[in-house]
Amino acid sequence: MRTRPAARAGQYAALLGYLVFLAFPLLWLLSTAFKSPRELGSLHPAWIPRHPTLANFRQAFDEQPLLHAALNSLLVALGAAVVAVLIATPMAYVMARHRSALSRAATGWVVVSQAFPFVLVIIPLFLLLKHLRLIDSLAGLVLVYVVWALPFALWMLVGHVRAVPEELEEAAAVDGAGRLRTLVSVTAPLLAPGIAATALFAFVTAWNEFFFALVLLKSPGRQTLPVVLTHFIGAEGVADLGPLAAAAFLATLPSLLVFALIQRRITGGLLEGAVKN
Amino acid sequence: MTAVAGARRPAARAATRDHGAWFLVLPALIPILLLSVGPLLYGIVLAFTDAQSGRTTATTWIGALNFRDLLHDTLFWESFRIGLVWAVGVTAPQFLLALGLALLLNQDLRLRRFARALAIVPWAMPEVVVGIMWRLVYNPDAGVLNETLRDLGLGGGRDWLSGLATALPAVIVVGVWAGMPQTTVALLAGLQNTPRELHEAAAVDGAGACRRFRAVTWPALRPVALAITALNLIWNLNSFALVYVLTSGGPGGKTRLPMLFAYEEAFRYGQFGYAAAMGCVLVAVVSVLLAVFLVGRLRGGEDA
């Protein structure tokens, strides 16, 4: 199909508009992170810092326990990712291979849980975790994140299991491999890339999460990165802009890196969920 | 297909398989029941009690009293109205913008890969960081928005996030920006599923771009569009972190979404029962949306 030059030009103009809209806040964050306090105070802020400095990063680490918070976030996100995948993979396998009432109910839960209002779930969760003495504990938060990551993890994994031909498993069974043996040595290796992508997705979800962390973690030493970031914004809403931007930029890097790795698979997973299922 | 394969197997084996299935499902099922389904039901029960945080006397059953109070709580209904304005105000432009972007990305343009990568970035970012970033953009003195307006000679700019008239629109723009990726990706996936031959045939028959969109693209895209719009509405009704970071519900409650309202009620004032009742009202609204989504999905399945 040929497109007329005028239409092509219009398309490029539109694309440029989108690029500007999508990119300018990101560039401004970056620019602010490298500006000196004096420049931030000036009446005409510039796009490119006149005297780029790392002072904001140093100050950010001095002001708030960023490293400690990052460690907390890392522990919680790793824990949630590993546990979520460990328990979701077998269940996804059953959901993909068995057409039972259980599978249907699980699929229903996956869809409906998208609509769970956190506010209705958080109060009972708070009471329950308090009862179990898991309030203000990273382990308690891991539990919550696991369940919270499960719907999308199941969604993705079911798609991946369906992509593994059932005939392969049947062939292994004919060759005398037991059920567990078949799962471990035939299905699991083929699923590995999908499982890895799912784990990374769960990692990002947990790393980025704010609401549950805000409610469930109270002592400053246990708070995760997003919660600590909000401490940069003072009670009055006045923030030290430079360090705030620097810390926000650093907190985003892990998510961006992981997301870059799994981008294709995530979009594929969403596609299967939205269109084919 | 699975049913046929299952029928071929002897019944005895099917039975052992089912035992195996339970064994495989339990590790996920128990946490789901305990930490997701259970709390949801418990939350609904709480809405009918006078539960409060840190209280020593026993919680008692008070029937629909919370709901009756809620009915007369003008602050809550104001918050509910703001929540609806926010949800629709974000979802509608988001859909149109994402549709435009998806159509562009589906074309053979230069910069396509770059634009695609950039379009996904907001999805990867922590919501708190998105909020912080836009606070920097909207900052009255050091923000790029006011600076640009000054450069263009459009006045001295304003304090966007604390102006009574501008706070909600300003927050909605951030919501649109933050939610673009999922919508764009879903729509792009839908577009790539539309039959290319049909498109070309229509072009050969002399159908213009508009006509082709209406006759070929849209019918194929409709199920995806409906699904993602319903999900967006639900996600936006449930959103919390963005607005919490941007305005904390201010100025004067102008951006106090129902989630923020209920959060304050529960964890600042300790009114667990009352906050749970608010949650129930939100569930009711969301359920209706979800029903629309599911019906649309089923119908989409028939079309396909």
Image: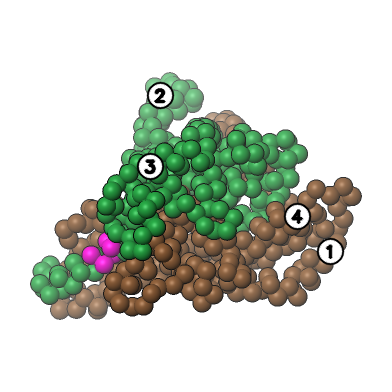
Q: Are marks 4 and 1 on the same chain?
A: yes
Left or right position of B176 against A116? left
- Looking at the rendered image, the disc whose residue lies closer to the viewer, 4 or 1, is 4
Horizontal and vertical percent position of residue B4? 45, 44
- Residue range in magenta is A16-20
Residue with the mark numbered 3: A55
Instruction: Provide the letter of the chain coloured brown.
Output: B
In the figure, the shade used to draw chain A is green
**Residue at x 21%, y 57% (from the top left corner):** B112
- Looking at the rendered image, the disc whose residue lies closer to the viewer, 2 or 1, is 1
Callout 2: few (<14), some (14-19), or many (20+) C-alpha neighbours within 10 Å?
few
Residue B63's label in the rendered image is: 1
Residue A185's label in the rendered image is: 2
Which picture quadrant has residue B211?
Answer: bottom left
Disc 3 + disc 2, Cβ < 8 Å: no
Mark 3 or mark 2, which has the lower sequence index?
Answer: 3
Q: Are marks 4 and 2 on the same chain?
A: no
Identified by mark 1, the residue type is: Gly
Horizontal and vertical percent position of residue B2? 45, 44
Residue with the mark numbered 4: B270
- Disc 4 to disc 2, how far (Cα)? 53 Å
Identified by mark 2, the residue type is: Ser
- Disc 3 to disc 4, how far (Cα)? 41 Å
- Looking at the rendered image, the disc whose residue lies closer to the viewer, 3 or 2, is 3
